[in-house]
Image (tube, helix red, strand yellow):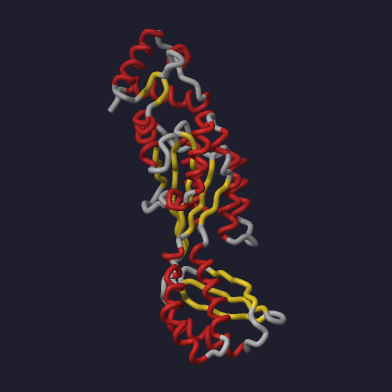
């Protein structure tokens, strides 16, 4: 552990750097702590020797290291209370009973992205975590039907299908009954494979136009399983930060945002608010990811805020704590 004056110096340097994105010199810290410049320089040199601060090439000032941020987050930071205005904006969304939960989460994260200028990511449960509960069919006009897929997590998807006018509703119903009989309880991402190898050989015995019906259902399930259950808010916000001011860094972060596997690695298993800084993120050494998991009944997901390591940790943690409690209540 650091001494109390070292902690004060580290905290003030981090908070100043978060505000300005410029290396912090001893003069600004002297004014805040009412100490001599020599004393503060010695403290800063000691913090640098211990690995909590780093010196940049462009000035005599210091910037926090990853180790410095980690110490700050674990020992010095306290979540920031939200302003009444910010709280009201978010509460208004959650008190709007006409909104579905997923829409309320998306809208609240739009506000949080505006408040912070960071990127928000919502990750719902993946198709492998959803099992088929029921398939039903609703006929529309002429040769159109709607296939409705319901999962055990309460997730509902529907797809409009065009069918050959020669196909009777009885044949479609027979196929639907067969799917429900044989595939209920199957993880959604395994349904297409089972359709191919278990259902297809059987429906030909019962249904004349089985190829057309089979292809329609196969398409619906494949689309559902492959749907990327993630949603970005303020995707370009992080690119406005001074840390991402060159073309290579911008390309790198944009490519990572497009990579489903990397984004899915953001998912959270632990409870509470979790903070991953730089190399801890497994995403990018220049960013911090603060994330939390929410659970309502059978449904769960992860909310993550992605920003520079020079992130307003206290503000983001306060916002996420408020958001998590509103979602789960």
The picture places residue 184, in percent across and down from the top left corner, at 44, 78
Residue drawn where x is 46% and y is 57% of the image: 301
The picture places residue 1, in percent across and down from the top left corner, at 28, 28
Determine whether 240 is above or below 150 in the image: above
The picture places residue 8, in percent across and down from the top left corner, at 38, 22
Residue 40 image-quadrant placement: top left
Determine whether 78 is above or below 326 in the image: above
Determine whether 282 is above or below 178 in the image: above
Residue drawn where x is 37% and y is 12% of the image: 41
Judged left or right of residue 302, residue 164 is right
Judged left or right of residue 320, residue 159 is right
The picture places residue 314, in percent across and down from the top left corner, at 47, 36
Residue drawn where x is 56% and y is 44% of the image: 235
Q: How many marks?
A: 0
Judged left or right of residue 77, residue 228 is right
Residue 117 image-quadrant placement: top right
Decide which of 314, 176 is in the foreground and name it. Answer: 176
Residue sitting at the far right:
141
Determine whether 48 is above or below 150 in the image: above
Residue 169 image-quadrant placement: bottom right
Decide which of 249, 62 is in the foreground and name it. Answer: 249
């Amino acid at each position: 552990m650091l001494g109390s004056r070292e902690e004060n110096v580290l905290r003030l340097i981090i908070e100043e750097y978060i505000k300005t994105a410029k290396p912090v010199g001893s003069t600004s810290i002297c004014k805040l702590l009412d100490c001599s410049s020599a004393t503060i320089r010695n403290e800063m040199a000691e913090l640098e020797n211990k690995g909590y601060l780093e010196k940049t090439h462009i000035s005599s000032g210091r910037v926090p290291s990853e180790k410095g941020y980690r110490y700050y987050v674990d020992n010095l930071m306290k979540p920031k209370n939200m302003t009444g205005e910010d709280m009201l904006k978010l509460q208004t969304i959650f008190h709007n009973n006409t909104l579905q939960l997923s829409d309320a989460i998306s809208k609240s994260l739009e506000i949080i992205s505006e408040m912070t200028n960071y990127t928000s990511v919502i990750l719902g449960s993946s198709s492998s975590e959803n099992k088929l509960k029921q398939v039903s069919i609703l006929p529309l006009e002429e040769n159109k039907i709607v296939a409705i897929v319901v999962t055990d997590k309460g997730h509902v998807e529907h797809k409009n299908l065009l069918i050959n006018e020669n196909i009777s509703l009885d044949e479609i119903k027979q196929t639907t009954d067969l799917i429900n009989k044989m595939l209920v309880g199957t993880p959604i991402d395994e349904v297409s494979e089972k359709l191919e190898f278990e259902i297809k050989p059987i429906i030909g015995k019962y249904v004349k136009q089985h190829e057309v019906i089979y292809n329609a259902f196969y398409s619906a399930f494949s689309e559902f399983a492959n749907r990327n259950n993630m949603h970005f808010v303020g995707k370009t916000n992080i690119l406005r930060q001074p840390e991402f001011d060159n073309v290579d860094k911008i390309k790198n972060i944009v490519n990572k945002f497009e990579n489903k596997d990397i984004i899915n690695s953001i998912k959270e298993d632990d409870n509470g608010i979790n903070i991953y800084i730089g190399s801890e993120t497994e995403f990018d050494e220049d960013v911090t990811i603060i994330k939390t998991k929410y659970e309502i009944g059978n449904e769960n997901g992860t909310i993550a805020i992605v920003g520079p390591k020079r992130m307003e940790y206290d503000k983001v943690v306060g916002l996420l704590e408020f958001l998590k409690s509103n979602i789960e209540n």
